[in-house]
Image (cartoon, rainbow, N blue to C red):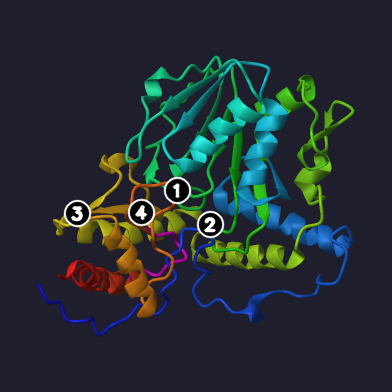
Amino acid sequence: MTITKPATRPDCAHFSSGPCAKIPGWTPGLLNTDVLGRSHRSSLGKARLKRAIELTRAVLEVPASHLIGIVPASDTGAVEMAMWSLLGQRPVDMLAWESFGDGWVSDVMKQLKLKNARKITAGYGELPDLSTVNFDHDVVFTWNGTTSGVRVPDAGWIAADRKGLTICDATSAAFAQKLDFTKLDVVTFSWQKVLGGEGAHGVLILGPRAVERLESYVPSWPLPKIFRLTSGGKLIAGIFEGETINTPSMLCVEDYIVALEWAEKLGGLKALMARADANAAVVQTWLDSRDFAANLAKVAATRSNTSVCLTLNADESVPKKMVKLLEAEKTAFDIGSYRDAPPGLRIWCGATVETSDLEALMPWLDWAYAQATAA
């Protein structure tokens, strides 16, 4: 079938799942540069770091009971910090249904070598049986599977009277999905994802039960300096007031602040979620009327509204061809599926993406598929 090349292109063709599109209208001129060239430990540096923490609390609706810290090494660093500092006291249930969850399983079983770790998994496109989770154990899971497009529907499956801790990697869910902090003892994310910030930094959110564990339990293994959250058996409170463990990029921090201020003016978490929902709906509406493409997430209630993953009724060379065609036309950048995921496409639909750009993209997917499958 011949399909005419669409006449309209997205104004912004950035649909990468991380780092993600910058906020609409972003320019370097939006950044406050007063702190550049200054120590992050100066009064101004600490004030700007604290400003980022306060805005994070406001926009994400983090309760006062939970502490927020900026830590090294993106979401990966934040998750590793939590696991290496907190695990080992109790058995642990490790949930995985995509590559990043599998990575945390591997680290716990092969690096920490916890003998009482239990692996609960599902294939790409599905969730594991959440009813099998034992909340007398610690539980480690991703809220939104970035590489599978499958998320937990809510926190209803998490026991309120749990004895163990819940450690939640929320990096592609934060600022787009409602996180129930009463059920989450540790939450991690990186601002390069949903708010399109610059990379290298992670955010670690600790609830009171996690703090209690930190101050009452010492792991049997040595902790690198950048993982240490306590000193003399007490939480290092400064980490959660803008005194970072290592030197942060203040340029990245200022970029994060710009994104948070944009989000706050937009209407906060509710508005961000609405934008992501509208964006994901554009892709799903297109999928519902196509017989050659489908959402990798099989159940509607567990479909991501950020990292929307598509499978195609074609051999694995087709999505690769489509990615190259769309990049050459400057209509979509970086939308190939993750290297460990089933062959297909992955389109970021977070709040920094304009719905009109996704609407403009959909006809290009039809065109690229026709081109890639032409005899």
What residue is disc 1 on?
146
Q: Is residue 35 left or right of residue 186?
A: right
Q: Answer yes or no: do the residues labelled 2 and 1 have beta carbons within 8 Å?
A: yes
What residue is disc 4 on?
308
Q: Secondary structure at mark 2?
A: loop
Spatial separation of the CA atoms under disc 2 and disc 1: 10 Å
As shown in the figure, which amino acid type bears the numbered disc 4? Val
Q: Position of residue 251 (x, y in %)?
A: 72, 68
What residue is disc 3 on?
313
Spatial separation of the CA atoms under disc 3 and disc 4: 17 Å
Sequence-wise, which precedes: disc 1 or disc 3? 1
Q: Residue at x 47, y 29 (%)?
A: 95
Spatial separation of the CA atoms under disc 4 and disc 1: 8 Å
Q: Secondary structure at mark 1?
A: loop
Sequence-wise, which precedes: disc 2 or disc 4? 2
Q: Position of residue 140 (x, y in %)?
A: 54, 30
